Amino acid sequence: MKSKISFFNAGIFKSMLKRFWPLWTAYFAVWFMSLPLPSLVVRLQGVKESAVTVVAAAMKTSVGASVVSAFVMGILAAMAVFGFLYNSRSCGMISSTPVRREAVFCSAYLAGALPVIAANLLIAVLNWLFTLSSGIEGACIFKMNAILFAVNSMEFLIFFSIAAFIAMLTANIVALPVLYLIFNFVFLGMEYVVRMLYGMFVFGYNELPDCVLEFMSPLVYLFTRISLNASQATISLTNWSALLGYIIAAVVLTAAALLLYRKRRMESAGDVIAVKSLRPVFKFCVTACAALCFGLLFFVIISTLFTSLSMSMLILSAGLIIGAFIGYFASEMLLKKSFHVFKGNWKGFVITIILCIVFAFVCVTDLFDLSSQLPDIDDIEMIVCNREAGGYDVTERSDIEAILKVNKAIIDDRDKYEGLDYTDYESVGYVSLRYKLKDGRVICRGYTLLIDDNYKAYYAALGSVNIVKSCFTPEIPVTVQNVYDASFEYPSGSGELNSISLTPEQAVDFYENALMKDIENGAKKPHIPEMSSTAGTDTPDSYVYIELVSVPDAPNEEDTYDSLVIEIDADCTECIAWVKANLNIDLHNIDG
């Protein structure tokens, strides 16, 4: 009779459960003290508020913390159940047993995954039970805890599968957590370093967009993109699709780990990279990372001494080559476990030197003319200008055309802008442009400019009625019901700041019948920051402050807040007239 391939061995599974029970217990204890125990305390105190009010904040925090918890537990579980791979004696013992490698791998994988999933389930059940009491919606709490269990378990499987895959690549227990950290951050980090290098040489690349490879760092991506939305009516998790995508990747990595384990040489215990065919890949990655990081650091330190293009290329090339030398031979030492690696390895390093010089040449000379590349107007959905200072959202086609025209003029005059020191605040200004395209991509440009015609044309384009109106249109409508607090602030003749409280009706009247009229008339313009201190004005610095609050219909939803600061400029005739008519203050003639 033909024998069947077994993918599970009960003896190995039970042995690992017994050996590493303190790890699973510690994981359960930490989560128990973080969530079910506080919920039990709340119940014993007799709190009768709704489930969302009592638990929502804790659950939201737990969903965020679950990413970090899964990241840490993933590597700890992998080090525990696959630790036998890193010791010659344990490897020999496993190999001598009449158990196929498929059974060993799957039994170890399940021994690492199932206890954590069981702990997650128990935590969710206990938290649900502890929050059941009169006045608390059981269905709401049940759904919250079901989501928490699903998120906790899925995120753990994602990171545990990554750790299991890396465990098959290395045969050194110390290298495993190091490679695990590198795997989770290397793509994001290297993209950021390359973008920074380009930003130092390519005109307009000072502004860094969101990293394209952020999804290659599961910890960062999940931590920033996964959150719980809770209200009395609905409870949902943002970005389920990201979790599902990572789960699919986890299944692929687990299958790849099994295939690697089937071909793994057990006598490689102690090696940094156990798969011989992947050693050149490891060597290349270490060399590239060391070259880029050291090259950036070296250039930042030394480049201030020189300004010529040729010297910049020389400095960058030197930094890249020094970093590549360190990475190339350090990785060789790790692979061979010896310091005698300099003989017979220079051919590959010479090729590395050539690649470093080529990369430096491409960066310094802008070989592909990236500085001149701007998106086509038909591809632009929105431009966000000067987003650090609150930003102007440009969406109208006519305004987009005006901004794009100014951007092209800045590029045409790049010769007089390159090399400007942005710290010279009196003579230069900074312009930030963030093009959001219809296909989801983001193109960013940032320029340090002289206070010249291009700079003024940029702010003139931002003075469009549509743009200015959008700046003074908060997410919460300015209505009598939504105005929480309002005041008019102005300096007296002696320089002291005076304040007059406004009623909600006055605030809405000022907003609709004074500010909006000045915007429609073109009187309200964006300030040019670098010129505001020298610009002449015949009105004191005065402004209206309006604080808004939106109270939801559902009693358990959180209030939302917003605010407006409306500076009254000399050209804002309607605002000045409103202040005089309603507050009896003449901004053109304020006495001490």
Image (cartoon, rainbow, N blue to C red):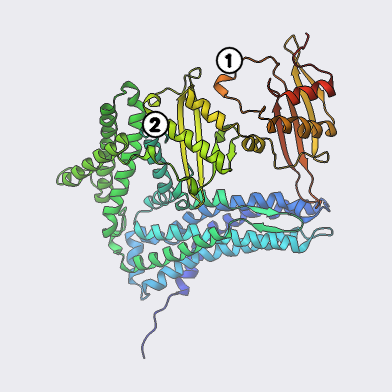
Determine crowd level at label 2: few under 14, some 14-19, many 20+ residues with C-alpha closer than 10 A: few
Q: Is residue 341 visible?
A: no
Image quadrant assignment for residue 2 = bottom left
Q: The residue tagged with tag 2: helix, strand or loop? A: helix
Q: Is residue 371 visible?
A: yes
The residue beneath circle 2 is 412
Determine crowd level at label 1: few under 14, some 14-19, many 20+ residues with C-alpha closer than 10 A: few
Name the amino acid type tagged 2: Asp
Label drawn at residue 495? none
Task: Please report the residue visible at 50 percent of the width from the left and 34 percent of the height from the top.
Answer: 432
Label drawn at residue 534? 1
Q: Residue 273: x percent and y percent?
A: 31, 55
In which quadrant of the rendered image does the C terminus lie?
Answer: top right
In the depicted structure, whether residue 219 falls above or below residue 418: below
Q: The residue tagged with tag 1: helix, strand or loop? A: loop
Name the amino acid type tagged 1: Thr
Q: Earlier in the sequence, mark 2 or mark 1?
A: 2
Tag nearer the camera, 2 or 1: 2
Q: Nearer the viewer, residue 298 or 541?
A: 541
In the depicted structure, whether residue 453 falls above or below residue 2: above
Taking the view exactly as shown, the residue that stands out farthest to the bottom is: 1
